[in-house]
Image (spheres, helix red, strand yellow):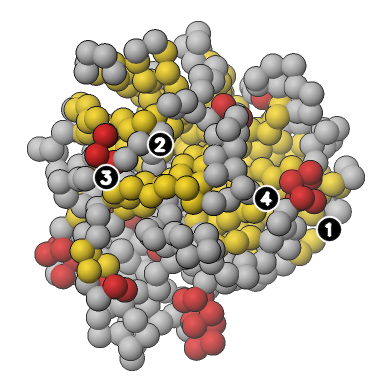
Amino acid sequence: MVMAEEKVVSPFLEGNFAPVREEVQAEDLPLIGELPAGLEGMFVRTGPNPQFDVIKGYHWFGGDGMLHGVRIKDGKASYRNRYVRTWAYEKEKAAGRALWGSTLGAPEFDNPNGPSRGNTGNTALVWHDGKLMTLWEAGDPHIVKLPGLETPGTYDYNGKLIHAFTAHPKVDEKTGEMLFFGYNMMGFDMAKGGAKVPYLQYSTVSPDGEITMTTPIDLPRGVMMHDFAVSEHYSIFMDLPLVFDMQRAMKGESPLYFNRDLPARFGLLPRHAQGSEVRWFEAPSCYVFHTLNAFEQGDEVILDACRMEDFDMGSLDSTTAPTPESRRMIREDSQQSLYRWRFNTKTGDVKEGPLDDQPSDFPRVHDSLVGYEARFGYNARFGGQAGMPEADALIKYDLHTGKNRVHLHGPNRFGGEGVFVPRPNAKSEDDGWVVTYVYDGNTGGSEFVVVDALNMEAAPVARVQLPQRVPYGFHGAWISEERIQAQR
């Protein structure tokens, strides 16, 4: 039996990183400003939120998934939040306490409940084939029902999903297909008796939700591959040197470490080709959590992403640093900012360079332009306390002119990923709004904020006052009212 130890201390359990435990629902919320005409739908964001006091250490990536949703309908706003009803969530709820540690270190082989809590559904969301799914990169998607945010179970594409499902699939809205991958850092599957499996597999899904292809892609070692990108004709994989080491895991350390001696490799694979046709391009060592977009220009495939010089995965884990202060420096010297690579498919050359020097992540473009050239991108700027992923602003990048516009959240106010919502009958690519949750450290409350994308530097056009604090999380999605009504 897992026994509770002394109280776990982590900056990711403090302030607005701290979990909220109550599931609430509130209608007709008060607001500052005015909700724009034409903004009808629901903003849903997932993130980590332990349902019980943490035992044995805490890693920010390891908390139970919780969905927070704001629905705009008939000029009024409502809010609700719900835990993702995973297998581990239900087991711990029945026990009335935490049964596993929340670290990403060694599996708890002596735990009678299993070696880990597994799939939390806490990372990102995707809409495809009339369904909203909440994702975790080492397991199956969980279906989300709107507007109630119920999660009735996982989805395995009628048994055709044979590998993990990335937290960052790409949906091409021009073709309707979805492209995704799954990685296995160990190269074997305990659920299959320790059978050897590829480090990386890639699949495509038709517009009507059928997996049409799965193919392995050879890698020399297990790595953490959090995201990828697609262009019109290619899928782009990132074999970066955040590598897996089982010996570290067995010692209770983070099994992932950044090997600066290895290059960054980018694999271009024709969208519907077998994995053996991948072509690798090498560049200086780096790490990327999130890509903004990719597109093609003549013989070149262009990738924009938030590049880091290096990354210490263990620095997010309360078991691996001696003091909370040292854990706050997770982005020290990482130089995490928007960056561009150009891969020449004819010559094999790689050109690269920064697009900005402001620290930022959670990049997004207009969803309809994923895989195609977009003029505008939207990032969350990290300008909170030293080293912590707190966004003091949203940055709108003009990728054609190199200029940017910054929307400041205000003194002691911090947001997260900004999601672009197009205006009905929009007249330009950026004719719409950017929405996000903002925590107000002055009041301790949270808001749903609507920013005019055509006037980023102005105050929000609407600030919906939420009935409870919304902790910092990861990724969100805007689901139009039309899609809510048509969900399957």
Mark nearest the camera among 1 and 3 is 3
Per the image, label 4 sits on a secondary structure element best described as: loop
- Whole-angstrom CA distance, mark 1 to mark 4, is 26 Å
- Residue 308 seen: no
Q: What's under tag 1, amino acid-wise?
A: Glu
Q: Earlier in the sequence, mark 2 or mark 3?
A: 3
Where's the N terminus, which quadrant? bottom left
Q: Where, by quadrant of the figure, is residue 471 drawn?
A: bottom right
Q: What's under tag 4, amino acid-wise?
A: Gly
What is the x, y in percent for residue 206?
55, 44
Q: Earlier in the sequence, mark 3 or mark 4?
A: 4
**Residue placed at 69% from the left, 16% from the top?**
428
- Whole-angstrom CA distance, mark 1 to mark 3, is 48 Å
Q: Give the label on residue 272, or none.
A: 2
What is the x, y in percent for residue 57?
33, 70
Q: Where, by quadrant of the figure, is residue 26 drawn?
A: bottom right
Residue highlighted by disc 3: 217
**Residue placed at 25% from the left, 80% from the top?**
109
Residue highlighted by disc 4: 130
Per the image, label 1 sits on a secondary structure element best described as: loop
Q: Give the label on residue 275, or none.
A: none
Per the image, label 2 sits on a secondary structure element best described as: loop
Q: Are marks 1 and 2 in contact (CB under 8 Å)?
A: no
Q: Earlier in the sequence, mark 1 or mark 4?
A: 1
Q: What's under tag 3, amino acid-wise?
A: Ile
Residue highlighted by disc 1: 27
